[in-house]
Every structure is written in structure tokens, then in C-alpha cells.
Image (spheres, coloured by chain):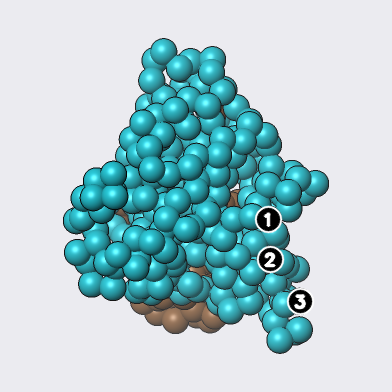
Chain colours: A cyan, B brown
Amino acid sequence: MEEERWLRYDRQMRLDGWGMAGQERLAQARVAIVGAGGLGCPAALYLAAAGVGTLKLIDSETVELTNLNRQILYWSEDIGRPKVCSAAEKLQRLNPLIRIEPIEARLTSENVEALLGDVEIIVDALDNFETRLILNDYAVRSRKPLVHGAIWGWEGRAMTVLAPQTACLRCLFEAGPPPGVFPVVGTTPGLIAMIQTTEVLKLLLGLGEPLFNRYLIYDGLTMEMRVLHVRPRSDCPTCRILRTEE
Amino acid sequence: MQVTVKLHAILRRYRPAGIRDEGLPVEVPENGTPRDVAAALGIPLELIHAVFVNETQATLDTPLRPGDLVRLFPPVVGGGES
């Protein structure tokens, strides 16, 4: 069993700076994925495959037919089932060595501390701005890394927030669009989720440079990927308070 | 003076007919700002939630120089529940 464990992760452990120590670090990690949709499904698959020890999946919805072009943890027979249950089953089959915690709930300002208090990194895989702000404000307050991803059509964006040194989501966007159905090709969340997953692994292993104060934008139509420079806003309603405390 | 403009996500719909995904050349007054870019393209200001000039975060009132690259973004978008 012990040997099988190391063989499973052999190819990534060969990376400089990873090794057994890095893999043990991942095994100890507790990561939350908030939203088990187009971003959350591929992010969960790859974090599970990489051996992140505990994955908490938070989502209140059930699988619908219109999800299946991009939410790749759900198959035709899953329609009508709670997403987190269907996802947890498959992730556990992919990697029985890790712990999956499915939470069938919608994140609110009342339950955010109870749901996220015991995780060290948060993946923003949400589809609505209101909940994103709750997540952003909690991450800033608790100084936990928040790995943000967002998509529309052929375009995606990603950024990593870590208070107080980086810009937060409110430094970039003050308000969101009204909730509603938006167009999306499945590959866009797939690609952005891979960026988010890579960010999580780097943060856990202390490798490379996260997307701090850098806003990655991707356009599938032009195959353009750029990193834009952002900075904490001096009048940001969320994160400026932390900086004045420093 | 002329600047180059890239419109993101739903703002793409404000590209003039015939222009595809390359940067749009847009004429703005001397000392113009991204606000003038929005006016030239007929984009309502309330749809613009983030502005970058030469890949650095800016505002609707950042002064522009000839040849600047201006990116306009609508509000932050989806993640893909339903």
C-alpha cells in the first residue's frame, strides 16, 4: 500500500522542489472548492489526482442536462442527483487515498466561517458575484489564499488573492452582472480550472510565483493569454483596512 | 489621436461591424481617456467594470497617449454552475 501510494505520484514527485516532502505536504492539505460546476469539476479532478489530502466540495445544486457540456464529473445518469454527492463518488474512485468532504449547501455570510474555517486554501469556482464577494471578504479577513477563476464564452480569467499584500476581487470589480444564463464553451472553464489547480499546488508546495497582483486573461478565439498588472486599491472597501492595520 | 482597444466578454458586441478579434483602432481627442473610448464605441459606462491601459490597471479617467492599448472589461463573470 505504501509503495502504491508513492507510485501513484511518482511523475510529479520527480519535479524539482516536490519529492516525498512535497507529496506529504499535499497529503496534509485541506482545500475547499466552492462551486462544483464548470470550474469546480476539473479543479476537483486534478487536485484529487495530485493527492491533495482533503478536498471539501461545496455546492447546493443538482445535476441538470444543460450542465453536461462542461461539468465533466457528471454523466447522463447523474441528472437530478446532488452535484457534490455525484462528484465525491467519482473523485473517491479516482483516488481512494484522499478524503472528500461533500457539503450540499449554498455559501452565505452566515455559514462561511463554519464551512471554510478549517481549510487553508479556497478555490473560487462560483457562478455568481454575490457569493464571490462573501468568499472574497472572508478570504481577506482570514488571510487565506483565494484562487479566483471566472469565465464567459470563449474567455476566462484567473487571479490569486492573499491579503494583505495583494489586490482582492473588490479592488478589481465593485459589482457584478445580474444572475442569469451565460454562454460558455466547455473548454474555457476546463482551461481556467487548470490554472487555478496549478496555483493551488504551487501555493501548497511553496514553488514558483502565484498570480499575486496579476490578472491572467485568456481568449480562446484569438488564443491570446496575457497577464495584466493590478494593485490593491487604496479605497478598497474590503482590503484597505488590513493594510492600514499593518 | 489613435489608441488600440480590446473589448472583453459581452463588450465584444460593441465592436464595429467587420472587425473581428484584433485590436480596434479608435480615435479619441488629445488628452482623451478611456471614457472617450467608451463614448466613441457607444458603450454605456455602467457596463464597464475594469479598465487596463498598456496591461496595467487604470480607470475611466486615466489620461491616454497615442498608441496606448486600452482593455475594457464588463463585470466579473461566471464559473459554471447552471
Q: Is residue A112 above or below residue B56?
A: above
- The residue positioned 19% from the left and 56% from the top of the image is A11
Residue behind mark 1: A117
Q: Mark 2 or 1 closer to N-term?
A: 1
Residue behind mark 2: A142
Q: Secondary structure at mark 3?
A: helix
Callout 2 crowding tier (Cα within 10 Å): few <14, some 14–19, many ≥20? some
Q: Nearer the viewer, residue A176 or A63?
A: A63
Amino acid type assigned to the residue bearing label 3 in the image: Ile
Q: CA distance from mark 1 to mark 3?
A: 21 Å
Q: CA distance from mark 2 to mark 1?
A: 9 Å
- The residue positioned 55% from the left and 64% from the top of the image is A145
Q: Is residue A81 visible?
A: yes
Q: Mark 2–mark 1 contact, CB under 8 Å?
A: yes
Q: CA distance from mark 3 to mark 2?
A: 13 Å
- The residue positioned 49% from the left and 48% from the top of the image is A54
Q: Nearer the viewer, residue A239 or B74?
A: A239
Mark 2 belongs to chain: A
Amino acid type assigned to the residue bearing label 1 in the image: Gly
Return the mark for residue A241: 3
Q: Quadrant of the C terminus of chain A?
A: bottom right
Q: Secondary structure at mark 2?
A: helix
Q: Quadrant of the N terminus of chain A?
A: top left
